[in-house]
Image (tube, coloured by chain):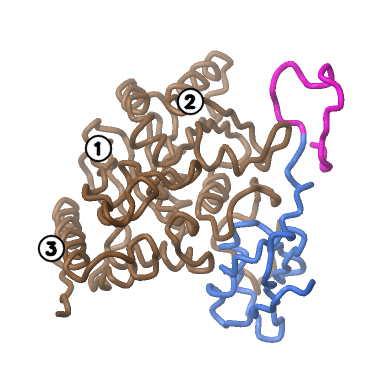
Amino acid sequence: MERGKTMKLSIPEEELVGSGHLACQGCGATLCMRYALKALGQNTILDIPACCWSVIDGPFPHTSVKVPLFHTAFETAACVASGIRAGLDVLGRGETNVVAWAGDGGTFDIGIQALSGATERNDNIIYICYDNEAYMNTGIQRSSATPYGAWTTTTPVKHFKKMPKKDLVRIMAAHRIPYTATASVGYPEDFIAKVKKAKEIQGTTFLHIFSPCPPGWKSQPEKSIQLARLAVSTCYFPVYEIENGEKYTVNKVIKKPRPVKEFLEQQGRFRHLTEEQVNGIQKNVIVSYNELLKKAGLDLEVHVEIKK
Amino acid sequence: MAKGKIIYKRAKDIPLNAMSVGSMLFNKTGAWRNVKPIIDYDNCIKCMICWKFCPDICIVIEDENPVIDYDYCKGCAVCVVECPKKCISLVEEGR
């Protein structure tokens, strides 16, 4: 559609996700799908294991996306995508995008062997993981993507999660995957550019998207986008990409990170943390961010002053 | 794709291959809302940031203006927080 001079849209106008879906108020996962499909276009086949999106899409025989969508078992997101790809290749439809779309549970825990296998075979699929940091669909159980200190129903306040989050992007980089990147729903232009880049690459591509979840994080629904941006500006979730497992590029370089406390204090799941524990998280965030900057070949070291 | 709700009355009406034949548009999620966002068009600069961040895809562009479709708006208020001119106000939904 032609637009006048007054209005410039920074992202494509075509909508392939319809209203009436079953997501909670302020859901980040819906925005993920909306932006991804804007970048991928109509010629796409989605394959979704058990995750929030298998519910958001709607009950049989209804759907809220305007592309073919295949519901599959929890651990099979990547191998079903490989199968769809093989079938399409036989039919001579190489230009159709095959997207495996899974949550953090179906990627970090249950689906990791299928993903690892598909990456090793270098099947021409795009794997998108929207990460809301727990099994939100089944009622907020801990996953290996849950960060240190977070409350979930299986890691209650007294026994909050003591292990750090699994660094899946680095696991994918160790596979020498042609392209892997992280993105945040707070920066749709960056996210769409990455999906478009992944679409052009022949071979497996993996995208890790940070997606706020108000019911699971015990945050306000209207703060969703703010939280997604705060996660980037506090260096809690850096936005970067890795090509062929070697070439690191940091897309949003944060020279003066904001204290991670600003991000944590807006979420009920971190409310029980003491000052000392918050400072511990702050230290780890900055150490890993500096490591990332070093890998990207940037001559920069950030630090945040911890107020006592 | 059918817009209304599809109900199969007899078992033999159900397609053999489980597939989607209707859209979720029958599900008017506006009923979930307890606060209602209202755009003040006098201050609106048509930046379309509200359209960009709407998780319910209920802000549509009509004549270069963002228009909220209250049939589907769930009242999450993301648009209210993201509006750079702060020209979207929230009012409590009447009964």
User: Relative to A230, does residue A40 appear above or below in the rendering?
Assistant: above
Looking at the rendered image, the quarter that the N terminus of chain A falls into is bottom right
Q: Which mark is residue A173?
A: 1
Q: State how many labels appear.
A: 3
Identify the magenta region. B1-21
CA separation, marks 2 and 3? 40 Å
Residue wearing tag 3: A299
Q: Amino acid at mark 3?
A: Asp
Q: How many angstroms separate mark 2 from mark 1 (CA)?
A: 20 Å
Q: Which amino acid lies under the numbered mark 2 shown in the image of this protein?
A: Ala
Which chain's residue wears label 2?
A: A
User: What tint does the image give chain B?
Assistant: blue
Name the residue type under label 1.
Ala
* Residue A264 percent coordinates (x, y): 32, 66
Residue B68 is inside the magenta segment: no
Q: Which mark is residue A231?
A: none
Image height check: is A69 above or below B83? above
Residue A287 point in image, percent of width and height: 14, 59
Q: Which residue is mark 2?
A: A81
Q: Furthest residue to the top?
A: A90
Helix, strand or loop at label 2? It is helix
Chain A: colour as depicted: brown
